[in-house]
Amino acid sequence: MAVTALYDYQYPAADTQDKFHGNQLLFVGWDDHFLFVAPLAFSVSPNTKFSDLVEKNLTFAYGRHADWAKVDFSKAVWLKSGQPFQPDFNKTLAEQGIKHKDALRLQTPGLNGNGTCF
Amino acid sequence: MDMKANKKKLGLKEKYAHMTRGLDWETTYQPKDKVFPQATFEGIKVHDWDKWEDPFRLTMDAYWKYQAEKERKLYAVLDAFAQNNGHLGITDARYLSAVKLFLTGISPLEYMAHRGFAAAGRNFPGVGPRVACLMQSIDEVRHAQTQIHALSNYNKFYEGFHAGASHQIERLWYLSVPKSFFDDAFSAGPFEWMIAIGFSFEYVLTNLLFVPFMSGAAYNGDMATVTFGFSAQSDEARHMTLGLECIKFMLEQDPDNLPIVQKWIDKWAWRGIRVLSLVSTMMDYMLPKRVMSWKEAWEIYFEQNGGALFNDLAKYGIKVPDCIAQCTVDKEHQSHQLWLTLCTHSHAMGLHTWLPDAEEMDWLSAKYPNTFDKYYRPRFDELRERADKGERFFANTLPMLCQVCQIPMLFTEPDDPTKICYRESEFQGEKYHTCSDGCKHIFDDEPEKYIQAWLPVYQLYQGNCWPEGTDPTAEGFNPVAKYLEWCHIDAKDTGDYEGSSDQANFAAWRGAATQNT
């Protein structure tokens, strides 16, 4: 539904990709690990290889959790917009259709902070 | 020749009648709808503005008299508080985090409310509401001022009070939550403003804000805050009445107003509840001496009092907002989830946080028997273990935010407190994320409005949150440090209370007041 307004109400969106200096926003959440209270926001190049995203950005953030070193990425489950998604570690974000403001969810069955989800 | 005065002075009721009916006029050289352009576009139909009944019937001379008397009392107490080192009488300097949150998060809203009611007063064609809004507008600016004056006393002694009331509301990530709430209301029409602030905030939710804060202040020895609370309280009673009168007026004027009013109530109840989640952390964690738990406050002031209110409004066809079912689940979780967030992000905040000690955790277990030990105690235990090893945990990457309430996406699914609640919408080819069904519903109803949201994390990534002249390509550039500098936050204002200068100063000064060495 449109905004009820006195005039034709049209304003630009605040966070379109052109404002990120060549980068895109990417959101990543790691299920069952509330030490990281919310999914994280990254500003990364669309040309980032998925393996670099995991080894650099995600490891910088999540590596402080003991479970991170135990993650077996061959068994990890990824969701994109809530749907199952199989990332290709050798391709870039752009090459596999991971777009600006996409939200990825990483699920690592068996790893849940020793049952605390923390 | 002597003038003969036959008539007695006018009574209050007559004066009020003249001011709100007799002084109005019909426009002549401009059509009325051009003079009051905002009166109709929201779709609210009003047939007779004279049906507006203001139970307070306050006139200007009475208003000045009451307020001046309250001011005299307030400033006498503030003087006494300052001269007697009242700041050393508080339970513990941890308490000041709650005060900092109030000064930075709530006092600027009082000022916003002042502006908003001034605008509403200008935009209503009826004189009754115009006068009532004018009075409330003056009240609100007085509240902002008295709060700033009362709390400025702490600025002489403690960190984090120096830029709070004016500067940080537009910059700090957690303050964008209350700011966006008022921006949303102020950018709506005058009738929606009245439901948003006059009704939802001032009537349905105000007790959840003021009662815990003022009781909390009293329990923790902060007489300055108690006094401005009392000074504001009699105004609040009038504001609540105005909010209720306004909603009844809309509903009585035309049956077509009902669905519009219901939509606004649903929206603003949820918006308000999300803002108040910050207060839940205050009640459960920030007050060294607790008043009651957030859950208990919610049950008394929302479920019981609010329930009675909605029973009263049922005769107009108003239904309890759908979001209440979600709130019944959330009341067991939200303060813990949010405090864990603040605890792991206070390196980038203008106030201190701390991990609850053993006695405090026992209190939380007793107040939250269904959830605290099961979900949250182990998390605090883990944070404590890390802190004891000298590794107090602070997040090193910025969080994803909800497009509507602007709180980090920390809230969990209604049916599973171990799963983050993700909601997604698409508008004009762009994705938007929300933290709950309530926020998603609000977004989907007016996406054009919320796509403009100033979301601090994403603004920082765009390079808009650093001091002028900052070179982000310089070697060793630290975006979060530059962000804090831009927010006027000093390192001393941030982080854990343990080891802070507030802690050290309070201990030293109170020691000097109570001991000989």
Image (cartoon, rainbow, N blue to C red):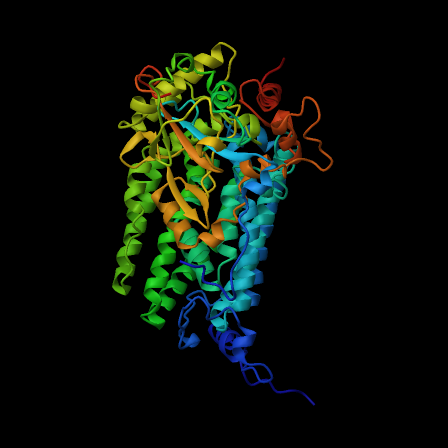
Locate residue A37, reporting x and y percent. Answer: 43, 27
The quarter of the displayed image where residue B517 is located: top right
Locate residue B46, reporting x and y percent. Answer: 41, 73
Quick check: A66 above or below B475? above
Quick check: B269 above or below B503? below
Q: Residue at x 49, y 65 (%)?
A: B132
Can residue B237 be seen by looking at this rendering?
Answer: no
Query: Residue lying furthest bottom in this view?
Result: B1
Question: Which residue is at the front of the view, A111 or B204?
Answer: A111
Question: Which residue is at the front of the view, B428 or B29?
Answer: B428
The quarter of the displayed image where residue B335 is located: top left
Can residue B225 be seen by looking at this rendering?
Answer: yes
Side of B154 where B381 appears, left or right: left
Query: Residue lying furthest right in this view?
Result: B469
The quarter of the displayed image where residue B416 is located: top left
Side of B305 where B142 appears, left or right: right
Question: Which residue is at the front of the view, B42 or B265?
Answer: B42
Locate residue B25, reporting x and y percent. Answer: 54, 81
Quick check: B256 above or below B455? below
